[in-house]
Amino acid sequence: MPGPLQRSLHRLARLLRRQRREARARQRLMASVFEATAEGILIVGRDMRIVEANRAFLAMSGYARRELLGQHPRIMQSGRQDAEFYRAMWGRLLASGQWDGKIWDKRRDGSLFAAHVSLSAVRGDDGEVLHYLGLFTDITEECLRQEAVEQLAFIDPLTRLPNRRLMRDRLLQALAFAARGGALVAVCMIDLDGFKAVNDTLGHAAGDAVLVEVAGRLQQVVRANDTVARLGGDEFVLLLTGLGAVAEAEEVIERALHAVRAPIVLEGGAVARVSASIGLALYPDDALLPEELLRRSDAAMYAAKRQGRDCCRRAPELQ
């Protein structure tokens, strides 16, 4: 007959076995949740090395588990966020223990994916960080749809050039920069001479091809910090920024006139010929406000047409 001590030991042994079974069951449950969740989960140690990733994150990133373990998370940085972004992210995470936001990361094959990320700092009883937990929700399709909408709002669909709205935004930025630094800004309004004849004789498809070709030629003659925009129809704008002298704008304009007047060979062998009438207005010499610069360059462009086309007139000459 077992004594009280033995009975107590038996009860303790049964309790410990039950607790071990429950602990194993909880571990299996947590493991199944970790692997079954649709959200990507990434766990990073306090030494900034990846210690675990679930199946959803592996599918999202294209990496195998063995390829990620021990790596620094920066191997997935896409370059679309700058160093300041990551400094702010880590500052918030360390200060509050939480960070939420959108990140573009890079898959193993080099393609990009967007994710809404919730980061948490997991701390021990002593308050020290044990590891960082990241929950990733793939929002790539949503972001691509949003970018497509923004493209429609700011980009001309035919030529892929900035449209009037984006051109105006860039003009405002250029004027603000010029006001601080003292540089000149040139607004060059362009209308194609002979374009209506191309549409009438060769058809609208040929006209579209001419517009696309002219857009490409204009992009080739401007400098890296300049903007070529299409306002609609056969009207374009060159926005020349950071100019030190009027002669710099005149050089670009001369290249543009030469590029546009060159014959355009279309599909099927037909040849289209157009030229450019260009109106030039300068900040701050000719106008200070963006709408006035656009108005005066437009008036100068019509003066170029009256003068004989395939030339440039400057706004002060109209006074």
Image: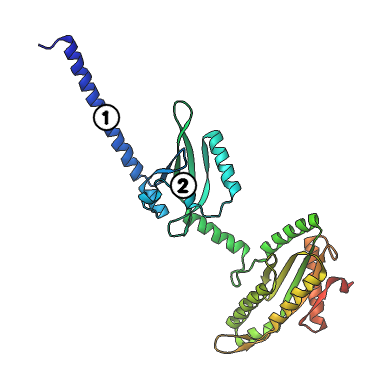
State the residue at coordinates (68%, 69%).
228
- Is residue 296 among the parts visible in the rendering? no
Q: Quadrant of residue 90?
A: top right
Quadrant in which the C terminus appears? bottom right
Residue 66 at x, y percent in the picture: 36, 49
Classify residue 92 as left or right of residue 131. right
Quadrant in which the N terminus appears? top left
- Helix, strand or loop at mark 1: helix
The residue wearing badge 2 is 72
Q: Residues within 10 Å of mark 1 (few under 14, many from 20)?
A: few
**Looking at the image, what colour scheme do you see?**
rainbow
Q: Nearer the viewer, mark 1 or mark 2?
A: 2
How far apart marks 1 and 2 lie (CA) works out to: 35 Å
What amino acid type should be assigned to the residue bearing mark 2?
A: His
- Vertical relation: 225 (above or below) 235: above
Residue 234 at x, y percent in the picture: 68, 76
Mark nearer the N terminus (1 vs 2): 1
- Helix, strand or loop at mark 2: loop
- Rendered image: mark on residue 161: none
Asked if marks 1 and 2 touch (Cβ < 8 Å), the reply is no
Classify residue 246 as left or right of residue 44. right
